[in-house]
Image (cartoon, helix red, strand yellow):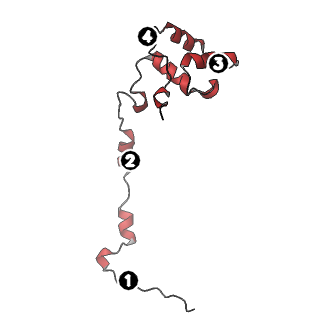
Amino acid sequence: MAPKTQTSLNIPKTRRHTKQEFKTKSIDDDSVLKIGSVKQELKTRVHEERLLDETDKMLRHFDLDYTYGPCVGLSRIDRWDRADALGLSPPQSVRNSLLKDKTKFYQENVFSQFRSI
C-alpha cells in the first residue's frame, strides 16, 4: 500500500496566522485582576432560597448529615429518635426545636416532597 501524501492548502496570506500575531495578542495582567476582583453579592443563595431562619438552616443541616442515618421516608423526630436509640448522638438542639414547633412546620425533612417519585 502506497503511503498517503499530504496535499498543500492554498490559504491566502491574509488568513494565515504568523508568530508575531500571537505575540501581540497577550493578556493584560490588569484585565485579569479586574475580572477576578468583581464581587457579586447575592441576596440569597440558590439552595437556601426557601430557608426562613436559623432553625430551618439547622434542621436542613441535620437532614443532609448522613452520620445519623438515612432520612428518606422518616419524619425528623423519628429520625432523631432512631439515631439516639442507635447511639449516634444526634444534636439535642434539633430535638428541642422539633418539640417546640406546635405548627408542625418543621416536621418533615427536605426530601419529603419527593416521596411520590
Of the two numbered discs 1 and 3 in the rendering, the one whose residue sits closer to the viewer: 3
Identify which amino acid the numbered label 4 is placed on: Thr
Residue identified by numbered label 3: 82
- The x and y percentages for residue 68 are 63, 23
User: Label 3 to label 2, Cα distance in Å?
Assistant: 53 Å
Q: Residue drawn 40% across and 30% down?
A: 45
Identify which amino acid the numbered label 1 is placed on: Leu
Which one is nearer the viewer's eye here, 7 or 105? 105
Give the crowd class for mark 3: few <14, some 14-19, many >=20 residues within 10 Å: some
User: Label 1 to label 3, Cα distance in Å?
Assistant: 73 Å
Identify which amino acid the numbered label 3 is placed on: Arg
Q: Residue drawn 36% across and 72% down?
A: 17
Rendered image: mark on residue 1:
none
Which one is nearer the viewer's eye here, 37 or 82? 82
User: Left or right of 63: which side holds 45?
Assistant: left
Of the two numbered discs 3 and 2 in the rendering, the one whose residue sits closer to the viewer: 3
Label 1–label 4 contact, CB within 8 A: no
Residue identified by numbered label 4: 103
Outermost residue toward the right in this view: 87
Residue identified by numbered label 1: 9
- The x and y percentages for residue 24 are 35, 63
Give the crowd class for mark 1: few <14, some 14-19, many >=20 residues within 10 Å: few
User: Label 1 to label 4, Cα distance in Å?
Assistant: 77 Å
User: Left or right of 70: which side holds 33?
Assistant: left
Outermost residue toward the left in this view: 14
Q: Which element carries disc 4, helix, strand or loop? A: loop
Q: Which element carries disc 3, helix, strand or loop? A: helix
Q: Quadrant of residue 76?
A: top right
